[in-house]
Image (cartoon, rainbow, N blue to C red):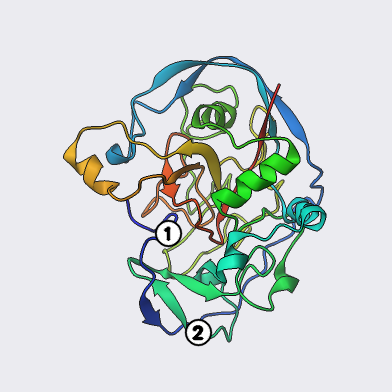
Amino acid sequence: MKSCCIPSRQSGSNTSADVRHSTLKKAQQGEANCANDIVDIPGGITLLGTNRPYFQNDGEGPLRHRKIKAFRMDATSVTNARFRAFVAETGYITEAEKLGDSLVFQGLLPKGTPPSRAVADAPWWRVIPGASWRNIYGPNTLDQLQDDHPVVHISWNDATAFAAWAGGRLPTELEWEHAARGGLGDVNFPWGEDEPNDVDFQPCNIWQGQFPQRDLGLDGYIGTAPCRSFEPNGYGLYNMIGNVWEFTSEVFKVRSLKKAAIAAHAGKVGFKLSKGGSFLCHRSYCYRYRIPARNNTSADTSTSHLGFRLVYNA
């Protein structure tokens, strides 16, 4: 699996490069109401995976029927405002803050950002000293933080710490897929089967245009979108596809004995499973914004497009 989706701290960020790119384009404002709404997700017989896998080596298939208990889920990913409340109460320090850097997509770096190291196999990712959930584009970018956007630069370990404080937990893959389908059954997207495109249908926050040179922003956003952007799915959940990748509680595993699958994921012992895609996904290179698609990262990795939401026992 290429690092186009979620690079890891273990990917080898060792290539020097000079970064002098365009000024950050601020995301347009959406609904500012980011109260922590929690919605009920019904139980029953549900689906996991697909019989139409796109990335064979990722373990997307086959389609399986599973029984699931009812649970509750955050209507949105965890916001900056909500994470700030957690930090204010507990004094928690994220792994990016402890380690002193995090991974930022090059197209979001403000003009004048100093030269930075690139991830070796995905040079559009830069290791930026001082980047964290507070300063999402590097030092002195706190003014770019928006309360109603999803918190980013959060590792899996940070997310589980927040979950313990909030009285919830990260979802299982089955729970996440069941919730994302919104009652529609065997579909690729929370709204059905219609494919997002670069012309006239943008139901979620993903990339439009030529990656990684230019995001046309036809969906209304460059970078993250507010937590309540776009239409919710049938269960009342926002941005289950696109915007930010979301952690699950599970270790990434591919149940395959094929040599290609084993080779594709060699060295990823203990990596965590994430779902949903992000604002950097485009069908031309990262078609992982489908419900059954799967991705992985090490537990200490943080990036500018990786977040989370919680579930709660009914």
Which of the numbered marks, if any, corresponds to residue 7? 1
* Type of amino acid at the residue the image marks with label 2: Arg
Q: Residue at x 56, y 83 (%)?
A: 113
Marks 1/2: CA distance? 21 Å
Q: Position of residue 244 (x, y in %)?
A: 57, 51
Q: Is residue 244 visible?
A: no
Residue 168 visible somewhere in the drawing: yes
Which residue was labeled with disc 2?
20
Which quarter of the picture shows residue 110? Answer: bottom right
Kind of element beneath mark 2: loop
Q: Nearer the viewer, residue 115 or 109?
A: 115
* Numbered marks: total: 2
**Mark 1: secondary structure:** loop
- How far across and how far down the image is residue 63, in percent? 38, 23
Nearer the observer, 64 or 191: 64
Mark 1 or mark 2: whose residue is earlier in sequence: 1
Between residues 25 and 55, which one lies in front from this camera angle?
Answer: 55
Q: Residue 160: which disc? A: none
Above or below: residue 268 compared with residue 303: above
* Dot 2 crowding, Cα within 10 Å, few <14, some 14–19, many 20+: some
Picture quadrant of residue 295:
top left
Q: Residues within 10 Å of mark 1 (few under 14, many from 20)?
A: many
Q: Residue at x 43, y 58 (%)?
A: 8
Find the residue positioned furthest to the left. 259
Q: Depth-wise, is mark 1 or mark 2 nearer the camera?
A: 1
